[in-house]
Amino acid sequence: MKRNPSPGSRPPEALVQIMAQRHGLDISAYEASFLRQARDRRCAETGSQTAEAYGDCLAGSRAEAEAFYQSLHVGYSEFFRNPITFALLEQQVLPALSAATGPARRSELRVWSAGCAAGHEAWSVAILLAELAGTRADPGPFRIIATDISAPALAAARLGVYDQAAVQNVRLKHLRDYFSVAGASYTVAPRLRALVDFSSYDLLDERSVCPPVSLYGDFDLILCCNVLFYYRAEIRQRILDKVCAALAPGGYFVTGEAEREIVARREELRALAPPAAVFQKQKHNHGLPGCHGYEKSKWDRFRPPSLSVPSVSSVVKTL
Ligand SMILES: C[S@@+](CC[C@H](N)C(=O)[O-])C[C@H]1O[C@@H](n2cnc3c(N)ncnc32)[C@H](O)[C@@H]1O
């Protein structure tokens, strides 16, 4: 028998309705348990005694609707957040990609940090690529595009100033080479800034397969970490459809440790070295599910020469 929710414990669907009908804000994509947690946090912060009372507060206040909506964009991040993943990137994935880039090979190495929050992940990849470029005689150009839906997160990413907790996994050498330190604050060095392009992009945007700033997708590496688990199962798959369509054949996909199992079920993505949450897109995946639903644009079929990307060699010379 279906149980009715007890009085005072409005189900998350009630929040979805209030947000849509009273405030025109669509939160239907989020997972029920995530909405419940967000509601409980806001309950405590607004001093609402019950979920029912919080629902009334939400219905009557535009400011609270905005606060609740913003609270759904959890922005926690760290540099080199998952050490196993970054070790695999450093030792295997990026050297392989870098070896395939350069004169007479692929024109540029293309990376997308999707759901980049305040930039930690994108800067971490930039550090590894800059280090790698320093070890190669003819490093090809690379391009790191970092996107998020949250304007405050993007503003913080562009600012590039972090506290000690955020950089706890950064090696001392990297701290010295890529940051300036003032007291307990760490600012990303200008030479690293030239490597990352931050812009706004909603992963649920159905009109596009990749951020407009990237022009044509075809990424060699996409990181979408700690984003999927906020969403309902079918929305997660929609995001993964998008990622698969934007990945070049043989390209790599990185997700959060807790999201590994969601991705492991995708036929077109092969786990690289379990238990790391790093996958590789199969080279021949025509006909496999997942990459449909997006028009393959003419850009998908060829890779134009590199655009106005800083050449790694020129960046490394300044390091
Ligand atoms: C917890 S942070 C993860 C940051 C980083 N990827 C990491 O793993 O440390 C999740 C980020 O995903 C962003 N996000 C959530 N939904 C999104 C969407 N539909 N499109 C783009 N970004 C989204 C949030 O704004 C937030 O900054």
Image (tube, rainbow, N blue to C red):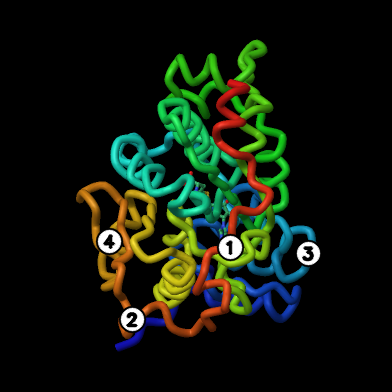
The local crowd at label 1, few if under 14, some if 14 to 19, many if 20 or more residues have their Cα within 10 Å, is: few
Q: Is residue 248 left or right of residue 28?
A: left
Residue 140, percent from left and from top: 50, 42
**Kind of element beneath mark 4:** helix
Q: Say which residue label 3 marks.
A: 61
Q: Earlier in the sequence, mark 2 or mark 4?
A: 4
Question: Would you place residue 218 above or below residue 195 in this image?
Answer: below
Q: Earlier in the sequence, mark 2 or mark 3?
A: 3
Q: Say which residue label 2 marks.
A: 286
The local crowd at label 4, few if under 14, some if 14 to 19, many if 20 or more residues have their Cα within 10 Å, is: few
Q: Nearer the viewer, mark 2 or mark 1?
A: 1
Quadrant in which the C terminus is drawn: top right
Any mark on residue 261, and which? 4
Residue 192, percent from left and from top: 61, 31
Q: Earlier in the sequence, mark 2 or mark 1?
A: 2
In the displayed orientation, state which residue is furthest to the left: 274
